[in-house]
Image (cartoon, coloured by chain):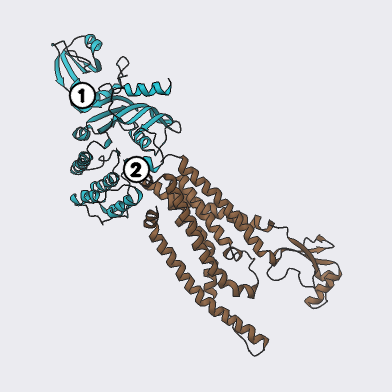
Amino acid sequence: MTWLLWRQHRLQAAWSGGALALLAIILWWTGVRMADTYRAALACRTSSTCGSVALFQGYGALTTLVNLTIAVPLLLGVFWGGPLIGREIETGTHTLAWTQSVSRRHWLYSKLILLVLATMVWSTGLTAIVTWWSGTLNSVRGNRFDPGIFEVQGVVPVAYSLFAVALGVAAGAVFRRTLPALAVTVFGYAAVRIVVDNYVRSHYRAPVVSAARLDQASPASSGSWTISNDLTLNGHPVSGPLNVNFQCGGVGTRQAMDKCLGDLGYQLTTKYQPANRYWPFQFIESALFVALALVLIAVCVIAVRRRDA
Amino acid sequence: MTPSVARLAAQAEPVQESVAVATSGVGKRYGRKWALRDCTLEVPEGRICGLVGANGAGKTTLLKLLVGLARPSTGSVQVLRRPPSDTTAFLRDVGYLAQDVPLYRRWSAADHLAMGANLNPVWDVEATRARLRALDIPLDQRVGTMSGGQRAQVALGLALGKRPRLLLLDEPVAALDPLARREFLATLSAAVADAAGELTVILSSHLVSDLERICDHLIVLAESRTVLAGELDEIVGSHRLLTSAKRDTSSIERQHTVLRTEQTPRQTAVWVRLDGPLHDPSWQNDELSLEEIVLAYLGQRSQPPGVDVSAPSGGQR
């Protein structure tokens, strides 16, 4: 089976390996320079020897590139997962493979193991580089919990990729054709991610709720994930437009106005996930997607083994 | 029966020709539709057996059941004295060539042979290569760019390379031109001759002329039932077209199996299987070609009732 797998997928392996290597070189080269600039800037700030330092130059396009890696799991699902079994059944070559002396079970498990291993290796490689590259920006911006950034760093991208390829391979085995498998992969993956991103993730742990005067700093420190900020009066949310001028009009500066409002009992109530929950959230979300992937792989196994050729 | 008695009984049985394939009441249903129903047949070992039937008679389904690509809904299948299974022990003995000759289109013939060598415990490297070389098939050309005949030869080479004891071919020549068809069948005959009785072939087709050239055994399926099975010579020898001036056919019907009767105002024609010597010399007695015989059996189903359609299966041996 090893020979068959290599012969069937060596071209894919070469392309994917090449793409990953290219990305790694670009990100490593720029990442090192970015980190150096950042360190120099920190050093000159403490010794106050610098005039104005331009922190980073020319990383805009790269940031876009890194943000785009959010689509990588989908690409793996479409190009690796969907055709793996779907195309074999579509072109009839599965009957060729299944009537050599290797059992269908052996064939199926070999393919699935290859798919899972390749996905883990490739996705882990990419995510490691992206996470490392983003380290500098993370320390500057402190926003790695943000949507669009949480999803491309840490461990969740690997879990997303496993889910996407499992969805692709299961759809291919169930629908027995490539095109429907691709459609199911794209729409299924997008649907699950949209639901999890928007309605599930914020509930992994109960958010911390804290109220602070408007003229005090928010307790949600840098790096935490603010879920909502509400203006409250004596603990009740304030709705409708606030007639600031009526109550605190003419006090002058913004600070003075905040103090005036604070004295009247207005508070800012913040719901947030603190920064130290970043890794627990990464692992909870990863576990969720790996579990979904396992269910889909079970579906694929049943579809291939129970159904007739 | 106690075990020792059973053993005695088994020993006492006369040595029988061994059977490569035996099915009993096999049916296969896809959803609500039966693709094959109540199919009972036997193929003795070492034969090249033609499987004829109209399109939709269940030939493809039957072959898939024999190689284990599909599982029967009812009945039992025995292939080389065991039920088909998804194991190396079974698969190594059975070669299969599916209807549309699936191959990896971007692979060369050599790649396919390498696959065969890697996925089978027994692989006939030299014979397989020699066979393709003798046909001038370029081993390193992509099969997607080959002619249909060349592709069929590559697929046949792949199926033969593992030295199967049973080879199942599903309409392999249906899409080929006459020359490629002849070459394919010649390759097949040569392989069977080389195997010296160790290889049984079941070859499905809806063209009797192809089968006549190569087969020594024939099974006719009509609406998935076996309506005729036996050695080719015996089949041809025992079927006759009897004609005479218009007359009553009941005396023939009593002694022989009438497949089809045609009455015109002046003439009576009877397609008949002789179940004994024909005593009445007043019938003009003509041989039937195999094609005519098969057509008579396939046509039976649409005949009005009264015609005997329950021709015994395997009754010719």
Chain under callout 1:
B
Location of residue A108 with respect to A129 vertically, above or below: above
Foreground residue among B52 and A250 = B52
Q: Earlier in the sequence, mark 1 or mark 2?
A: 2
Within the image, what quadrant is residue B196 found in? top left
**Discs 1, 2: same chain:** yes
**Which amino acid lies under the numbered mark 1 shown in the image of this protein?**
Glu
- Colour chain A is painted in: brown
Q: Tell me the crowding category of disc 1: few under 14, some 14 to 19, or many 20 or more residues within 10 angstroms, Cα based.
A: few
**Residue marked by disc 1:** B234
Where residue B200 sits in the image (x, y, percent)?
A: 27, 35
Mark yes or no: residue A180 visible.
no
Where residue B172 sits in the image (x, y, percent)?
A: 27, 40
Foreground residue among A53 and A243 = A53
Q: Residue at x 57, y 65 (%)?
A: A152
Cα distance, mark 1 to mark 2?
33 Å
**Residue marked by disc 2:** B92
- Colour chain B is painted in: cyan
Numbered disc in front, either 1 or 2: 2
